C-alpha cells in the first residue's frame, strides 16, 4: 500500500509540474531574473540622480536603499500584475504594430500600455493586471518610504510606472528588428 501511495504522489507531482501556468517563468524572470535588472537598477539610478527621497541621502548607502526599494516595488508590482492577468486571461506581451508610419505605430505603442488582448479570444481588453500592479505597488511601497511619502505619492509612483511602461513599448516598437540570417551559398 505504501508503494502505491508513493507512486501516486510522484505522478501528481509530475502532473503539477507540467501543468504550471505559462506566466510562471516570465514572473520569475521579471522579478528576480535578468529582466529585473534594468527596471530595478535603472529606477534606483534615476531616483539617485534626483535624490528622491532626499532623506536617504547621496552616496552608496542612499543608492543601496533605492535599489532595495526598487526591488521591493518591482516584486510587489509583479506579484499583483501576473495573478490578475492570469485570472483575466490577459496577454502581457508586447506585439509590434503591423501599421506603416510613425504616428500610427506610436499610437499603437502607447495604447498597448493600457489595452491588451485576451489569451482566450484575442479580443481587446483593459490591461487590468498591468494597471493594478503599477498602482498597487506604488501604494504598498509607501509603507517603507520615509515619513513624507504619502498615499498620493504612491499613486504618483504608479503613474510613473505606467509612463515607464509606455516608454518601453515605444522603444520596443521602434527598435530595429532582428532579421534572420540567410544561409550563404
Image (spheres, rainbow, N blue to C red):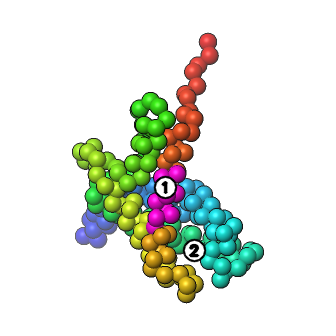
Residue 69, numbered circle: 2
Tell me the number on the disc at residue 125: none
Query: Residue 48: image x %, image y %?
Result: 68, 69
Q: Is residue 143 left or right of residue 83?
A: right
Magenta span contains residue 142 = no
Residue at the location (60% across, 74% down)?
68
Q: Quadrant of the C terminus?
A: top right
Q: Residue furthest front?
A: 103
Whether residue 140 is visible: no
The answer to whether one can see residue 62 in this image is: yes
Quadrant of the rendered structure where residue 26 is? bottom left
Residue 42, quarter of the rendered image: bottom right
Front residue of 52 and 16: 52
Residue of label 1: 165
Find residue 20 and report its horizontal and vertical position in percent: 35, 57
Which residue does the image show at 47% across and 42% down from the upper left? 106
Earlier along the polypeptide chain: callout 2 or callout 1?
A: 2
Q: Look at the picture and state if 109 lies above or below 13.
A: above
Q: Are marks 2 and 1 in contact (CB under 8 Å)?
A: no
Up-down relation of residue 154 to residue 30 (above or below):
below
Q: State the separation of the CA atoms marked 2 and 1.
A: 18 Å
- Under circle 2, the secondary element is helix
Answer above or below: position of 3 versus 145.
above
Q: Nearer the viewer, residue 31 or 14?
A: 31
Asked if 156 appears above or below 129 in the picture, the reply is below
Label 2 packing within 10 angstroms: few (<14), some (14-19), many (20+): some
Residues in magenta, as a range: 158-167
Q: Position of residue 36 (x, y in %)?
A: 56, 60
In the picture, the quarter occupied by the N terminus is bottom left
Q: Position of residue 146 (x, y in %)?
A: 57, 84
Amino acid at each position: 500500500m505504501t508503494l502505491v501511495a508513493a507512486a501516486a504522489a510522484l505522478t501528481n507531482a509530475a502532473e503539477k509540474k507540467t501543468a504550471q501556468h505559462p506566466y510562471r517563468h516570465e514572473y520569475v524572470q521579471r522579478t528576480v531574473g535578468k529582466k529585473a535588472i534594468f527596471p530595478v537598477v535603472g529606477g534606483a539610478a534615476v531616483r539617485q540622480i534626483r535624490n528622491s527621497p532626499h532623506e536617504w541621502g547621496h552616496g552608496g548607502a542612499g543608492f543601496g536603499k533605492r535599489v532595495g526599494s526598487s526591488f521591493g516595488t518591482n516584486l510587489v508590482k509583479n506579484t499583483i500584475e501576473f495573478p490578475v492577468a492570469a485570472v483575466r486571461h490577459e496577454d502581457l506581451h508586447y506585439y509590434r504594430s503591423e501599421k506603416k508610419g510613425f504616428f500610427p505605430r506610436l499610437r499603437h505603442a502607447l495604447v498597448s500600455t493600457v489595452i491588451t488582448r485576451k489569451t482566450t479570444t484575442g479580443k481587446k481588453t483593459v490591461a487590468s493586471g498591468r494597471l493594478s500592479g503599477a498602482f498597487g505597488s506604488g501604494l504598498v511601497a509607501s509603507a517603507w518610504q520615509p515619513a513624507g511619502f504619502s498615499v498620493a505619492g504612491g499613486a504618483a509612483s504608479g503613474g510613473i510606472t505606467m509612463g515607464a511602461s509606455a516608454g518601453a513599448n515605444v522603444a520596443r516598437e521602434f527598435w530595429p528588428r532582428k532579421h534572420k540570417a540567410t544561409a550563404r551559398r
